[in-house]
Amino acid sequence: MKAMPWRLIGAALLLASLGLAGLWFLAPPVGADLMKNSFVKQLAFVVVGVGLMTLAMLPSPMAIRRWAPWIYLAGILALAALLMWAKPVRGARGWFAVGPFTLQPAEFMKLALVLALAKYLSAERNWQSLWGAAGAAAIAAVPAALIVVQPDLGNALVFIPILFAMAYAAGLPRKWLIGGLAALAIAGPIVFYAGMKDYQRARLASFVRPDLQSLQQKHAMGATASGGFMGRGVGETAGAYPFHIPDRHTDFIFSAVGEQLGFVGCSLVLLLFAALLYEMFRVAWTTRDPYGRLVVVGIAAFLTAQLTINVGMTVGMAPVTGLTLPFVSAGGSSLWTCLLAVGVVANIARRKMHELGRVT
Amino acid sequence: MERKNLILLFALALVSIAALEARLFWIQVVRFGDFEEYRRARSHVELQEPLRGEIRDRNGKVLARDDRAFALEVVLEDFEKDTGARTRVERLVGTSLEEPLSKIAARIETLASRRPEKEHKAIRRRERRTPYPLMPVLTFAQAFEIDANAAFYPGLVVRERLRRTYPEGAEAAHVLGYVGKIQDDELGMLDAAGIDEVLGPDGTALLAARGVFQQTVVGRCGIEQAFDARLRGAPGLILREKTAGGKGEVRMELLTPRAGESLTLTIDIEIQKRVRAAMGGRPGSAIVMDIRDGSVLALVSEPAFDPNHFVAPTTTEAVQYYFQPDAGYPLMNRAVGGRFNAGSVFKIVTACAALETEVCTAGRVIECQGRWNRNYRHLNCWIYNTYSTTHHGRDLPGALEVSCNIYFYTTAAEMGMGRLAEWAGRLGYGLPTGVALPGEKKGFLPTAGRETDAAQLGIGQSMLLVTPMQVLSMTAAVAGNGDVFTPRLLLDESVKKRASGATASTLEVVRQGLWRVVNGPEGTARNEGLRKFKVAGKTGTAQNPQGENHAWFAGYLPHDAPTYAIVVLLEHGGSGGKSAGPVAAKIAEALQ
């Protein structure tokens, strides 16, 4: 056993506590009970999430690798079950109700995909043939398709950077990667015109033409910008009504950070993410386990993609897609997925050579 | 796999973060000034009331609709800048605004108190820039005055709104009901309207705290209450945003309102008016039903109220009047919610039951000696008590004609309580009729008792309590083929009926008796003008502990091809034939 990667865990926990503090100070829902309830709920999520993170450190990476296809399969089944049985929440069949809580399998699926894809790509024959590469694409495409039809475009989009980053890290020939990107570029407009719902099209169009920008995004951007360099101070949300930016404590939490803590606060948050990613890549660099390396790359890819899209939509650089800010946004599924992911990375970081078993 | 690939990936991640950082620097630091306008913009969300569905009679005549009206809202910040504004507007509307203004102040404080101390100032500032409802109703002249002289009335905003109107006034009051302001514990009803989905629970809570839903109306009593969900529709939301200079205004529909559904009643307002006129303002109830499908053509309960008096602005005097005892409880719908002693109209049930249980046949003659039994001195025939004479021997139709108590004491006692109550239940007593009006009572049907109790029940006394609607329902069943209909009030309501089990031959005998009540030489309603309109029926003079007898008439017309059933009840009206009969005759005339 090597030492615990405290800096990695520390960065993750700092971000999670920022989310918790955000519920209380930055963007609390109006109404005393509502505020207390969502805070207590999030507190419970953090406590359970830390437990899950610890659990993720226990099994050997070998065992995780063995389980990966089953975890992936369970995720696919959960996604399929959603489409059959889940009640639509705001038009999307993305949540299972478990008592007073809801679970969003799409969040967990990202981690499941990383674990499974890493197993697939760590076998050399799987990335040295074109068919093998197509297989990797299929592994990512199946859950992505199940998520798109919920419909939840945002979470499905994250699968693309996961796939490409891991394929690149695995050593897939460049020309195939470039070919894949070209295929996506061609498929994009087709999906836009044939496969999307009107509101999804409108959101994407608003990204190209700011005059079509949604009210929510306009206000999120305005709120962020009006924080200025130092911010308006904690609790100064009065500039924006809660109904200007629905989901402010979840998807649009960053607008509250921007408004109240300003450029300085935003930069600190981004710096924390940069530190987290640096620690992850360091683990990927030092580990001698190819499977673990791919897993870490996949996790770093989905965190980066989600961070970029989420903050991007808050500052008007990306269309509104309904993605959470990792660790920070209120909500259990997203937080648990991120903390589990950190647990897996920490697990890989702590293993010495002899604990990794025979490597293929 | 090559480790150096990691360098490129990490570089990509850093580039993404750097791009975000650059963008943040751009909007938060470099172009900070551009968002000045956003910071100073004044915007608020308005509730857009949905058009409540109309209620029409069966011929399409409008009985309830929404009219345009005006409400006054106030933006405190602007209003209080000009110290003279309050005096001017108070002079215009003629009332003091002390109370509504202090209520608004209290609302703002409540709103602020839900948040940490340091935010209070910002919340107060924000709320004082938001329009708050000040007066629910303005006259057109007042609205025009304020709207046209905006500079003279700073901070006051006239808003168009909808006001429920009942063009026929009190005529169909108990059918229609009225609308009243929503109570705080009913706000949950609004969630379904999709407001939560647009604003989030916190946004909805904010609007509620501002009192935006205060003027929302919900149905109280009658059709307005029973079909509130269909009539109500769903409100819309509008975002209004004023830019910093107050030059432009952006209006954005966040949620489109959905108008409520209009309903068509089975009521015919022309018949309804004539039935009401026939009652002549005497307390009681009269109902007319089409026996072919159970649809109610007219439903009157007197004294009535004018539903317009309950729609804001209500005057305290008008509302107080309706609640004082002297007014005779006008809000009670006697047709379905009044419980009365039935009296002799119940003999129809006894007659049916006696024939069905074969206790007697149509031809069985029972001798009336004025007194039923020497053991029970209080069980006499009415003719003995009034004229000290007797009915001599009568068969069943003849006993109905003269309403002989002895005949029905005897048959009821022979049947016993159980069998008589069973048939009363089959004909709808002791059960709600299922009419779609709130507050329906099921009355009381005794089901067990001694021989004397059965005898008493046989003439509709005993503990029995009935509603006029139950009596009507029974009359319609007897006039038709024995099916008991659920009374219908909406044309699109499905026809629901159940068989009472009374056979055609039984009904034929009973109908013969009811024909003789009007046409027989000794019929209790022979001189009341009913014959001309081919009415058959039964009178009832119900003794009751509260005072003068209740007068009943339950019948149908025309007797050779029954189409309409009528029930008339005059509370403490005296003799059924003499008081209720002529009212029924006037109703029959209206039905020609």
Image (cartoon, coloured by chain):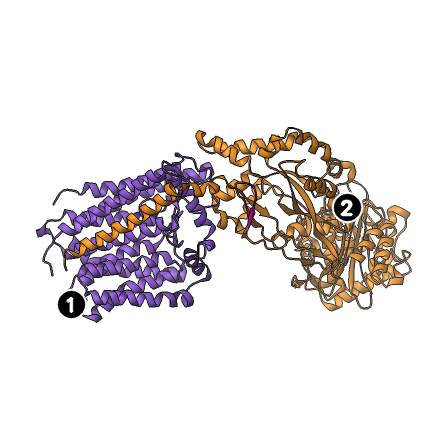
Chain colours: A purple, B orange
Q: Secondary structure at mark 2?
A: loop
Q: Residues within 10 Å of mark 1 (few under 14, many from 20)?
A: few
What segment is highlighted magenta in the picture? B245-251
Q: Chain of mark 2?
A: B
Badge 2 density bin: few <14, some 14–19, many ≥20, Cα 10 Å: many
Tags 2 and 1 on a common chain: no
Quadrant of the rendered image containing residue A125: bottom left
Task: Tell me which corner region of the image, top left, top right, bottom left or bottom right, holds residue A88.
Answer: bottom left
Q: Amino acid at mark 1?
A: Arg
Compared across the picture, whether A359 is left or right of B134 comes to left
Q: What is the distance, in whole Å, between disc 2 and disc 1 at their CAs? A: 90 Å
Q: Verify CB contact (< 8 Å) between mark 2 and mark 1.
A: no
The x and y percentages for residue B26 are: 36, 45
The answer to whether residue A276 is magenta is: no
Q: Secondary structure at mark 1?
A: helix
Residue B206: image location, x then y, percent: 51, 40
Labelled disc at residue A138: none
Q: Is residue B349 visible?
A: no
What number is the disc on residue B304?
A: 2
Asked whether, in this view, residue A85 is left or right of residue B17, the answer is right
Q: Which subunit holds the residue at mark 1?
A: A
Residue A355, given in percent of the width and then of the height, sits at 10, 51
- Name the residue beneath numbered marker 1: A125
Task: Give the camera-side residue of B141 and A32.
Answer: B141
Q: Where residue B550 sits: x, y (%)?
A: 80, 46
Report the front residue among B415 and B82: B82
Q: Quadrant of the N terminus of chain A?
A: top left
Residue B248 magenta? yes
